[in-house]
Image (cartoon, rainbow, N blue to C red):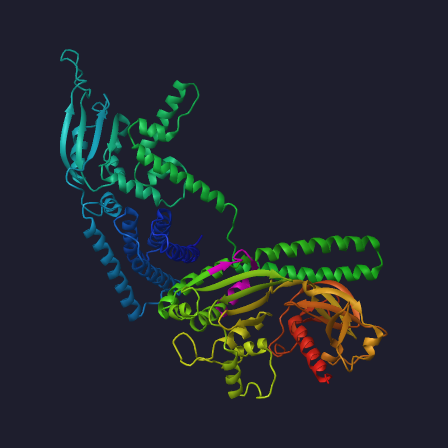
Amino acid sequence: MSMDQALQTYIEESRGLLEEMEGILLRLEDSPQDAEMVNAMFRAAHTIKGSAGLFGLDAIVSFTHVVENVLDDVRAGTLAVNSELVELLLKCSDHIGLLITMVAEAGEALSADQMASGDGLVAGLKGFLAGSAAADATVPTLREAAVAASGGGPIEEGDYWHISLAFGRDVLRNGMDPISFIRYLATIGDIVSLSVDDGELPDLEVMDPEACYLNYSIEFKSEAEKKTIEDVFEFVREDCKLRIFPPPSHLAAYVDRLENASGNTDMLGQLLIEAGILTGNELDDALAAQDSMMAVTGGTRPPIGEVLVKEGVVRKEVVDVALEKQRQIRDHKAQEAKFIRVSAEKLDELINLVGELVIAGAGASLLAQRSGDAAMHESTSVVSGLVEEIRDGALKLRMVEIGETFNRFQRVVRDMSKELGKDIGLEISGAETELDKTVVEKIGDPLMHLVRNAMDHGIESAETRVVAGKPARGTLRLNAYHDSGSIVIEVADDGGGLKKDRILRKAIERGIVSPGQNLSDNEICNLIFEAGFSTAEQVTNLSGRGVGMDVVKRNIQALRGTVDIESEEERGTMVRIRLPLTLAIIDGFLVGVGKSAFVVPLDMVLECIELPEADRKSSDTRNYVNLRGEVLPFVRLRDEFEIKAPVGKRENIVVVQYGGQKAGLVVDELLGEFQTVIKPLGNVFRHLKSISGSTILGTGEVALILDVPALVQLGVARDGQKMAAHEP
């Protein structure tokens, strides 16, 4: 992987970690004692900082380091979590996100205001650090211990390294002077005390003047790492027995390092080496001791952690933490093995190729039918079935849960509640509902408009709610579910509801409706989606300018969706959005009118019936039929699209359903199911009513995809108009 690719991976992963931190902070406000959430947040910040250091992103490293210090104090119990701290940490998360965005935009510099904001956040964080130190100055934090262990600060008085050094008998014969190593040791620290053990010294009569009999015990004060101390004795390592024990204060720092290890390895020995607790030579010695123990026990290999503790190389507390970290890493790797990161562009290319394969397969099936060759027809049928499975599998790759989009509004609701001075809670359901990745990306802004409007205009203040007999805390609900091949997203509140009289009065003032026009409650509510419409008596920085709801409707219609609103005064409002599950490939039902072909999304087709002769003759005066005792309005596609072709001997009705309403589409021919690759209409044709796209048939001809929601609404509206016209 190149550095540019690695940097892009860091940017993506950091943004994901920031989303995780934000979610944790919002939950931590209600559960401040949850140690696991605090640890998870610390690990996220530590990962962002550590990876930033690899790329030389000093601004991110320095700012995140201060955040990490505060979180460290929270973990150590010297700093309590409260709403003020959560608010500050949320702002810090935003600032880190801004710094990462600057990196993503090729080194764009922060503005003066942004720099001042960052400095203010650092000052706020240091204020919390100072407060926690004043609250309990006698309790050293893990951060302070870590700084001491890494060489970033002084070691406490009397807190020394202990070095046990036993030279081999032949060290002098091999040309090595033990005293020279001790002198060299003094160059990287201070030898506080040195004691010599002469217990192995023989009588003078049998003493070998070229043999070394002395062992040394050294108290050593230094800010060096364990590996650095061990390297002092590198040239005599094979001729001595060396044991290096860290100062007592390093225990907390070692535990901290293990908890925040990168997770690149799940081997216990390597974990301890990466944390600076163990050296490579010590691990080799422990492995050799493990083999010796196995020989003694008759084939049972003791765990390496047990060997390290028995040999006195590592303390048991540290090994226990390392074993827990090992388990976490292995669980994480097992989870990661289930997923693979793929570029969205590659998925788009795959979907395009599958679309072309569908079209080519349809052409091959058509040729097989015309040839009359049964074997070829059977082969193409098998291929068509496999293509359909490939299509479904490819589309599933693009399906994502909408819960991630919903969860982003936790922060929005929290911040806006404080800004508006209201007490509002967010309830989420249907978060596991899946839809196309492209739809998820484009629905975020419309949902933001709806959530902000519900909080600003819909939900009342706590005082008003109490007077009305409601709970002081307002509730905003986000829900999603599948229905008839579509996904339905609901944004509901338990506020005051829409004031229909005021909406109608404003609409008449603006000339949107005429004074004598008779509108249903639903039609009145939907007037708020008209361009520039607003009933707000006061313009705020949140809403009231009439430039939001019409944009919501246009954006949803651009996704081939619809938006509807239901409201009851003093009870609340619900906005219901219906969107297609995918924008790429669908199962369609092919119909013909004259020489023209049209595609109806198969999920919306209920049944097909023949248009009775009596109803054909009376279609000039009415556009509905009796469907088993139910009034079914219909739209004649021949008339809707002004198709000039002779009417056949029979016509058919395709009964479709959308949003709980039924309508019929009158066509000449029923051509059967058809895998439909959706091709967008060009800019010249994008404003055509009742058409949502196009597709290519196996013959190479173009068929238009019908906009069923628009046709259903058209049929229902015309039915109501004609029935009203015939009323006495």
The residue closer to the viewer here, 104 or 117, is 117
Spot occupied by residue 285 in the image (x, y as percentages of width and height): 33, 28
In the displayed structure image, the side of residue 619 where residue 27 appears, left or right: left
Q: Image quarter for residue 102?
A: bottom left
In the image, residue 198 above or below residue 671: above
Tell me residue 5's x, y (percent): 44, 56
The quarter holding residue 264 reads top left
Asked whether, in this view, residue 529 is left or right of residue 99, the answer is right
The quadrant of the rendering that contains the C terminus is bottom right
Who's the residue at 79% across and 67% down the image?
A: 609
Residue located 37% across and 22% down the image: 293
The answer to whether any part of residue 597 appears in the image is no
Can residue 185 be seen here? The reply is yes
Question: How many labels, in total?
Answer: 0
Q: Residue at x 44, y 66 (%)?
A: 470
Q: Is residue 362 above or below residue 255?
A: below
Residue 441 highlighted magenta (yes or no): yes
On the image, the x and y values in percent for residue 81 come to 30, 54
Determine if the magenta segment contains residue 503. Answer: no
The residue nearer to you, when weighing 404 against 15, is: 404
Task: Name the residue rendered at 80%, 56% in the picture.
Answer: 377
- Measured as percent of width and height from the top left, residue 380 is found at 76, 55
In the rendered view, does 307 fall on the left or right side of 241?
right
Where, by quadrant of the figure, is residue 30 drawn? bottom left
Q: Which residues are magenta?
A: 427-446
Direction top: furthest residue: 205
